[in-house]
Amino acid sequence: MSVSPRVIQLNEANSFLKEHPEIQYVDLLIADMNGIVRGKRVERASLHKVYENGIKLPASLFALDINGSTVESTGLGMDIGDSDRVCYPIPDTLSPEPWQKRPTAQLLMTMHELDGTPFFADPREVLRQVVQRFDELGLTVCAAFELEFYLIDQDNVNGRPQPPRSPLSGKRPISTQVYLIDDLDEYSDCLQDILEAAREQALPADAIVKESAPAQFEVNLHHAEDAIKACDHAVLLKRLIKNVAYDHEMDTTFMAKPYPGQAGNGLHVHISLLDKKTGKNIFATEDPEQHAPLRHAVAGILETMPASMAFLCPNVNSYRRFGAQFYVPNAPSWGLDNRTVAVRVPTGSSEAIRIEHRVAGADANPYLMMASILAGIHHGLTNELDPGPAVEGNAYEQLEQALPTNLRDALRELDDSEVLNKYISPDYIDIFVACKEAEMQEFESTISDLEYNWYLHTV
């Protein structure tokens, strides 16, 4: 006799509460269009009701701009009476929040229509529909993220960030030396607490490295044989990093370009495809440059990259990150073990051949980023596209900039893309574009300090 999913989930809640009698509250979390985690907090005694009946949240949660205001042009606000949908728990995401003073747990949710069908505007559902295409091909997506961030001081200077003082030396860092172990030592308590908190939440963060700017670091997540789960890990890890750093009297930023003249924050993802029957990596080969499945997948990514840019780089600030000196690719390109290209193929082991996508900023929504990349891979595989020769040497010297350089152009590319509109609901693309166009309109109507400096007394 089979056991219903609802009973299994209730068993999950019972086991967790029995194992954690100290828990007083549970945060119910859902990631919006910008990857910002929103939701409700409930008391411990209400957790069973959450598993049984879900919770109500308005559909407009997925029509919020970066400031949390509803963009009415999406049609998800007052046009539908700001009506509710129902959010249900995602299995295996119930875990403690180690940073809380009052014992609190968290649970990731996903939105559904009132009849139980998935809600089309939930970014997690956008990704699920693309992943389903790979299920139909008998393939499992295996993915792992690398997430860059800055530790910053809780006190800014005229509204601008500054590196935090080192708890060890009391000095503000100025080093740009990548991989420097001494810089890890300067913030070792905070960084170690991040890894330990991740372990407590079953997030597979397995390494932290110093990046190439003051107090900039990268956390590597171990691969998951589930693309959606890999994105869950990335969303929850960002929240964890922010809260643990705050406990150490520091702030963090995942802003794509917080400092002029310094490296931006990237979000790289490694992807391979496993045959469901054999479990083998279909990219595995002794000759990756000539291996047909790998070439087709890379070609699809390259063809759809311009149209994907709005998902990879979704904010006005995102496009300030690009530049050869910061190893941010500005043209669709690929190569073997080459960090100057957009799509790098690491070749250390023939069995572990994979695609590393190097374009997105840390401000991207992981679900939407992954959906656009996988759409390209599927398009390349099913149409047997060819990427041309791999780039050898410095791609910046060989290729002219060919990707959109601003959000407006990126949104036009997305809106006009016949390929992405086949994989991602045009209705969802309309909502995304409407939100981002509203943000741009507000940004462009704001008079900057630079404009006053240039024009107030000179024209």
Image: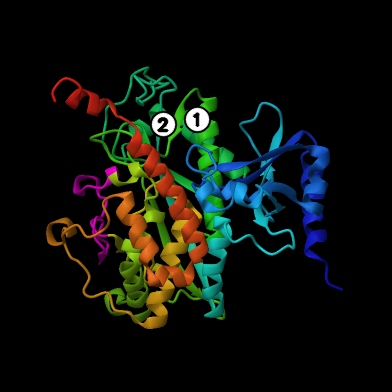
Majority secondary structure of the magenta segment? Answer: loop
Q: Position of residue 4 (x, y in %)?
A: 81, 66
Total tally of numbered discs in the picture: 2
Name the residue beneath numbered marker 2: 151
Direction from residue 124 to residue 184 in the image, left or right: left
- Indicate how the structure is coloured in the image: rainbow
Secondary element at image label 1: helix
The residue lying toward the viewer, choosing from 341 and 68, is 68
Q: Residue at coordinates 34% horizontally, 45% vertically from top-left?
A: 318
The quadrant holding residue 445 is top left
Rendering coords of residue 352 (x, y %): 41, 67
Where in the figure is residue 60, as x and y percent of width and height?
60, 48
Q: Are marks 2 and 1 in contact (CB under 8 Å)?
A: yes
* Residue 222 visible (yes or no): no
**Quadrant of the image occupied by residue 155:** top left
In the rendered image, which residue does mark 1 sit on? 245
Which circle's residue, 2 or 1, is located before the other in the chain? Answer: 2
Please say whether residue 331 is one of the residues in the magenta stretch: yes
| Label 2 SS | strand
Does 454 sit above or below residue 241?
above
Between residues 439 and 78, which one lies in front from this camera angle? Answer: 78
Residue range (magenta): 320-341
